[in-house]
Image (cartoon, rainbow, N blue to C red):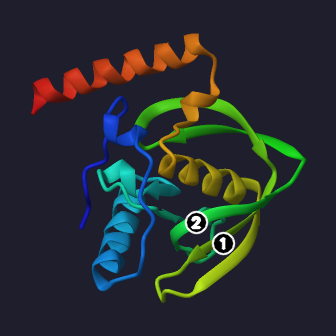
Amino acid sequence: MIRPILIHPDPRLKKLCEPIAAVTPELGKLAEDMLDTMYDAPGIGLAAPQIGVTRRLIVLDCEKEPGHAPRPLVMFNPEIIWSSEDLSTYEEGCLSIPDQYAEVERPAEVQVRWLGLDGKLQEEQFSGLWATCVQHEIDHLNGKLFIDFLGPLKRQMITRRMEKLKRERARQA
């Protein structure tokens, strides 16, 4: 089921998300809905708070090479356990901040630990777009958006655009 994605500014996007005690069938269904929503948007990552659920759950799939099979990942309670000193800069966007992009500098590689859909602990090292995406989505779980890395002027400008977009959408509804 495709769920509505919250648009910034929304107070739910700034909340610290609660850890997940156990992976349940209901959380599995939520993860499935999140993947459907992410692919439909279309996006490469989605965090539970973006659909109004303040739990520590993210989904991502950064496999964009033609001919490569999708690689959907579901991460409950993801945490970065190592970050490289090398940095990389990507132009980031966000499904909760549509059509707005900015360059953000982050560690080029990260090691992440999380619970999978099977409830088992998993660990993987990510680089490139995968590293950027997983850090971006984990930031959402901590109430942080990519625009929080920008200067105040650019952040205010984007926030004003989002407020205008929300007003326009409300008028059309």
**Quadrant position of the C terminus in the picture:** top left
Rendered location of residue 20, percent (x, y): 42, 70
Q: How many residues crowd around disc 1 within 10 Å: few (fewer than 14), some, or many (20 or more)?
A: some
Asked if 106 appears above or below 9 in the picture, the reply is: below
Rendered location of residue 106, percent (x, y): 75, 42
Residue 113 circle label: 1
Residue beneath the point at 31% across and 20% down = 163
Q: Earlier in the sequence, mark 2 or mark 1?
A: 2
Mark 2, secondary structure of its residue: strand
Please state which amino acid type lies under the numbered disc 1: Arg
- The total number of labels drawn is 2
Inter-mark Cα distance, 2 to 1: 6 Å
**107 sits to left or right of 172:** right
Residue beneath the point at 42% across and 75% down = 21
Mark 1, secondary structure of its residue: strand
Rendered location of residue 162, percent (x, y): 36, 24
Residue beneath the point at 90% across and 48% down = 85
Residue 6 circle label: none
The residue under label 2 is 78
Please state which amino acid type lies under the numbered disc 2: Pro
**Quadrant position of the N terminus in the picture:** bottom left
Asked if 103 appears above or below 82 in the picture, the reply is: above
Between 20 and 148, the residue placed more toward the observer is 20
Verify CB contact (< 8 Å) between mark 2 and mark 1.
yes
